[in-house]
Image (spheres, rainbow, N blue to C red):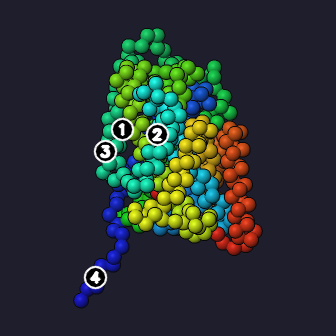
Amino acid sequence: MSSPPASGLRRSLRLWDLVFYGIILIQPTAPMPLFGVVAQEARGHVVTTILIAMGAMLFTALSYGRMARAYPSAGSAYTYVGREIHSGLGFVTGWSMAMDYMLNPIICTIWCSKAAGNIFPWVPFAAWAVFFAVMFTLLNLRGIRATARTNEIMVLGMGIVIVAFFFAVVRYLFHAPNLSAADFVRPFYNPDTFSLGAVSTGASVAVLTYIGFDGISTLSEEVENPRRNILLATVLTCLITGLLASLEVYAGQLVWPQYWSFPDVDTAFVHVAGRAGGRVLFHLVNVTLLAATIGSGMGSQLAAARLLYGMGRDDAIPKRFFGAIEPKRGVPRNNVVFLGALALAGAFTMSYQLGAELLNFGAFISFMGVNAAALVRYGVRERRGVLRYGVLPALGFLICFYIWLNLRTPAKIAGGAWLLVGVLYGAWKTGGYRRRLELPELPPE
C-alpha cells in the first residue's frame, strides 16, 4: 500500500514564473521616480549609472543564488552572514536591513505627495503627506493587501504605459530639429560634464532601481529545481531590469538633456513624458507611477510592521509594544501606527533623495555581506573554482563597497549613526556578542 504524499508547499514554480515575480517585486517603472535625482547627481549620465549599478547587482545576484542553494528556506542576507561569518555581523546586517524596511514607507509618502501635487497643484505638499501617511496606515490596519492577480494587472498596465512612452519619444525625436549623432552618445558619456565621482554618487542612488530582486529567494521551497532556478532567475531579473531601465532613462535623457532644468527633480520623469507626449502622457505616466508607489508604500509599511512584530515577539526590541497583535483583525496595530507616524515625520524632515540614499546605505551593507558570505562558504571553506567562487563574489563585494563609499556625506552620517546604535544595542543584548542574537526572517516586500 502506497503512503500518502507528504503535505507541504508544492514545487510548481518554473524559471520564468520566478523571473516574472522578480519583475513584479522591482516594478518595470523602477528607474522613473529616481530619474531627476540621479540625473542631477551624475550630471546627466543616468544610463551610465544604471549600467554600473547593474554590474554590481549581477555579481550580487550570483552570490544570492548560490547562498539560496545552501539555505533554501532562509533568504535573508543576515542569515547568510550570521551563519557563514559571525552571528554579530549577521545581526548588524539585519539591523541595516531593518532601516531599509522603515525608510521605504517614508520615501513612498514623499513621492506620492509630490505626484499628487502634479494633478492638484493647489493642494499643498503637507496636506498630501498627511493624506498618504494616514491612508497607508488605515488600509494596513484593516488588513488589506494586494493579490497576485492585482500585481499582474498593474505590471501589464505599466507595460502598456512604457510602450506608449517609447512611441511618444520616437515621434518626438523624429520631429526634433538639429539632432546630431553626438546627441545619441551623450547620455552615456558627455565630455563636458563627465566626472567619475559624480557618476559614482549617481550610481549609489540608481541601485534603488534593483532593490527587491533578493525576494526571489523567499520562494525557494516552491520552485522546481531550486538549486538551478533560483540563481538563474535572480540573475535574469537583474539583467532584464537593467536593460529595460537603461532604455527608459536613455529615452528620457534624449527628450530632456538639460538635467539641471527640471521643474521638480523628484517627479522629473513625469515632466519628461509631458515633453514627449503632451499633457495626456504627462498625466498617464504620473497616475501610473502614483498607483505603483501607493502599492509599494502600503506593502512596505505592512512588511516593516511584520518585521518589527517579529523582533518584538523575540524580545529583540520592547515586546509589550512591538510584539502585540490586535486580536480582531490580526494585525500588529502598534507597529502600523508607529510606522505611519514615522512616515509622516519623515515626509516633513527628509528629502526623497536622502531617504533613497539611506535605504541604499543599508542595502549595500547587506549586498556586501552576501558577497562576503558566498566567498567564505564556496571560495574559502569548500575551495571550489577560484574564478567563479572566489573572484566573482570578491568583485561584487568591492564594487558594492566602492559605490557605498560614494554615497553623499549626509547619508553616510545618518546611516552610520543608525549602524552605531545597532552595534551598541547588539553588544548590550548579547554581552559583547558572546551570546547569539538573531532577527526574525524578513518578510518579502
Which residue, as the protein is rendered here, is positioned at the far right?
432
Q: Residues within 10 Å of mark 4 (few under 14, many from 20)?
A: few
Q: Amino acid at mark 4?
A: Pro
Looking at the image, is mark 3 or mark 2 nearer the viewer?
2
Q: Helix, strand or loop at disc 2? A: helix
Vertical side of 370 occupied by 297: above or below:
above
Helix, strand or loop at label 4? It is loop
- Which marked residue is nearer to the observer: mark 4 or mark 1? 1
**Mark 2 or mark 4, which has the lower sequence index?**
4
Q: Which mark is residue 158?
A: 1
Say whether residue 125 is left or right of residue 95.
left
As measured in the structure, the alpha-carbon distance from the residue carrying label 2 to the one carrying label 1 is 24 Å
Q: Nearer the viewer, mark 4 or mark 3?
A: 3
Residue 409 makes an appearance in the image: yes
Q: Is residue 164 above or below residue 326?
A: above
> Which residue is found at the position 46% from the left and 32% from the top?
115
Q: Which mark is residue 131?
A: 2
Q: Amino acid at mark 2?
A: Phe
Question: Spatial distance from mark 1 to mark 3, Cα to Cα?
Answer: 9 Å
Q: Is residue 245 above or below residue 39?
A: below
Q: Residue at x 42, y 36 (%)?
A: 289
Which one is in front, 315 or 157?
315
Number of callouts in the render?
4
Residue under numbered circle 4:
4
Image location (x, y in percent) of residue 395: 63, 50
Residue behind mark 3? 153
